[in-house]
Image (cartoon, rainbow, N blue to C red):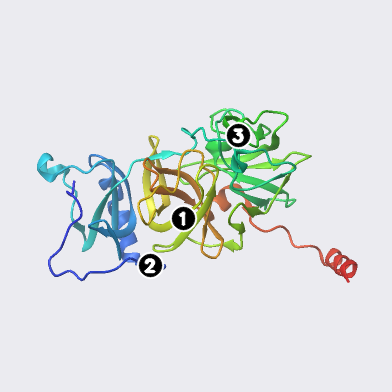
Amino acid sequence: MIPGEREEGGAREEGPPDGPIPHDHRIDVVKERFAARLMTYPNVTGVGVGLRMRAGRRLSEPCVRVFVSRKVPEAELRASEVLPRELEGVTVDVVEGEFTLLRNGAPPLPPERRRARHFPFAVPGTSVAGLRVTAGTLGAAVYDATGGGSQLLLSNWHVLCGVPDCAAGEEIVQPGPFDGGTAPRDTVARLLRYADTDRVDAAVAVLDGNRFLSDAIAGIGLVSGVGAAALGMRARKSGRTTGVTGGIIDAVGLDVTVGGRLFRGQFTVASEDGAPVVAGGDSGSLTVDDRNRAVGLLFAGRTDGAYWIANPIADVIAALGIRFTPDPLPLDAAVLLTAADS
């Protein structure tokens, strides 16, 4: 393993990015070519395209990013266990990172609005879960794109479902059971469909008859559209446990092991000062950019809380058949509403 950040004589010192950096497809190709091999090295937990780190500082230089559970001095490794310093002219940079799902270990915090019952309007950014789960986060209000246009509740599969034998129709409570939610009193929705794949951990539920869902996320507001994660982009989320926090998109196209499973094509958001930005119970939070566009669905984080991992939102949309805007009104209905308002 590469023993710490590497200083290269005569290398140009770069500062941290102040926004998205230009995409370099050459690095994508190198990462894809070597990712499977790099994942076989000791302690490696993930491989993606990331921002290079030097002496604890994040630079504007893209590289092949390798996450490891623990950095080991090169002297303690066999030659075959030492990661390459570069691949086909692209720098290989190593950062410590072991990741876990963020439903388990939801901390027992004192009651407050994010863990309280919201009736009749449930609010994204607050506690929710299936009855066989502890607690996660209600990510966003979305709409069924497969027909009917019904408003749906979006979160993670492991928050709304979480067990292999879960099925459509199972009750979802707000707040989650860990925060005192019980059925039928707190039933907010019923599971509709889910995706539990190597790219997406997501699920949607259809609202219960006497419950409603706010389109605005607590502390963030309305989702303005859909975007794509890019290196150097600032992003934030509103979660059940840590509230509204943010950071910088630090790695994309990430193949990463979480809870013994390999997820592909994910991205990370990193704290810019090292302080925790995520904790147990934040799973399911929607990740948005600085224009409030949805870019991802948070499902895991580094064990120290300094990084979170998200599914790219395009993959979530495709897997679940959803959209972030309702069906447009038919022309005749729009005319009637306009006339009524005049």
10 Å crowding of disc 1: few (<14), some (14-19), many (20+): many
Q: What residue type is labelled 3?
A: Gly
Residue 180 position (above or below residue 205):
above
Q: Is residue 315 something one can see in this rendering? A: no
Q: What residue type is labelled 2?
A: His
10 Å crowding of disc 2: few (<14), some (14-19), many (20+): few
Relative image position of residue 169 (x, y in whole percent):
68, 33
Query: Which residue is disc 3 drawn over?
Result: 176
Relative image position of residue 159 (x, y in whole percent):
55, 37
Mark 1, secondary structure of its residue: strand
Relative image position of residue 118 (x, y in whole percent):
69, 41
> 120 or 153, which lies in front?
120
Cβ–Cβ below 8 Å for labels 2 and 1? no
Comparing labels 2 and 1, the label whose residue is closer to the camera: 1
Give the CA separation, mark 1 to mark 3.
24 Å
* Left or right of 21 in this view: 151: right
* Left or right of 239 in this view: 168: right
> Would you identify the image quadrant in which residue 79 lies?
top left
> Would you identify the image quadrant in which residue 24 lies?
bottom left
Residue sitting at x 19%, y 49%: 83
* Left or right of 273 in this view: 213: right
Residue sitting at x 60%, y 34%: 176
> 148 or 63, which lies in front?
63
Mark 2, secondary structure of its residue: loop
Of pointers 2 and 1, the one earlier in the residue sequence = 2
Query: Which residue is disc 1 drawn over?
Result: 246
Q: Which amino acid does label 1 sit on?
A: Gly
Query: Which residue is disc 2 drawn over?
Result: 23
